[in-house]
């Protein structure tokens, strides 16, 4: 089903390119069949994108149990917590031993 959705999107892209190019050529030449062809290609692009979107929504719905399991695993990982040091400086909580940004020199 994923191949179907991918192929639909590629075909929609090709149809969109044709609709754009054909539309410009139809404006320049004012050929009635080219105008009709470009318009129908634009409608086909909309239909292909709609069908591809339905395919992707269907696949997303089928993969939900796997996504829920992954979400539970990540939640457990975050709740247990990791002690990762990212370079935080540890200092004493006694304010008398801290430098007050140049006001008084440190002992």
Image: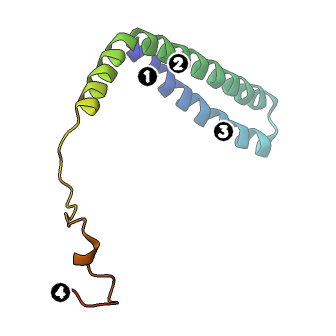
Give above or below for 47 relative to 24: above
Disc 2/disc 1 C-alpha distance (Å): 7 Å
User: Mark 1 or mark 3: which is in front?
Assistant: 1
User: Mark 3 or mark 4: which is in front?
Assistant: 4
Rendered image quadrant of residue 83: top left
Query: What residue sits right under mark 2 in the picture?
Result: 52
Give above or below for 90 relative to 23: below
- Element type at marker 3? helix
Residue toward you, 70 or 12:
70
Disc 1/disc 3 C-alpha distance (Å): 21 Å
- Element type at marker 2? helix
26 left or right of 45 in image: right
In the rendered image, residue 100, in percent from the top left (x then y), is placed at 32, 82
The numbered disc on residue 20 is 3
Q: Residue at x 71, y 26 (%)?
A: 37
Residue toward you, 36 or 46:
46
In the rendered image, residue 107, in percent from the top left (x then y), is placed at 17, 87
Which of pointers 1 and 4 lies earlier in the amino acid sequence? 1
| Whether label 1 touches label 4, CB < 8 Å | no
Circle 1: is it few (<14), some (14-19), or many (20+) Cα within 10 Å? Answer: some
């Amino acid at each position: 089903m994923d191949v179907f959705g991918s192929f639909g999107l590629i075909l929609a892209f090709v149809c969109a390119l044709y609709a754009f190019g054909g539309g410009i050529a139809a404006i320049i030449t004012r050929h009635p069949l080219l105008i009709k062809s470009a318009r129908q290609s634009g409608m086909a692009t909309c239909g292909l994108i709609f069908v591809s979107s339905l395919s992707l929504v269907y696949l997303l719905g089928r993969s939900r149990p796997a996504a829920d399991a992954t979400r539970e695993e990540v939640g457990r990982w975050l709740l247990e917590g990791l002690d990762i040091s990212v370079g935080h400086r540890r200092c004493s909580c006694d304010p008398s031993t801290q430098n007050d940004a140049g006001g008084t020199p440190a002992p």
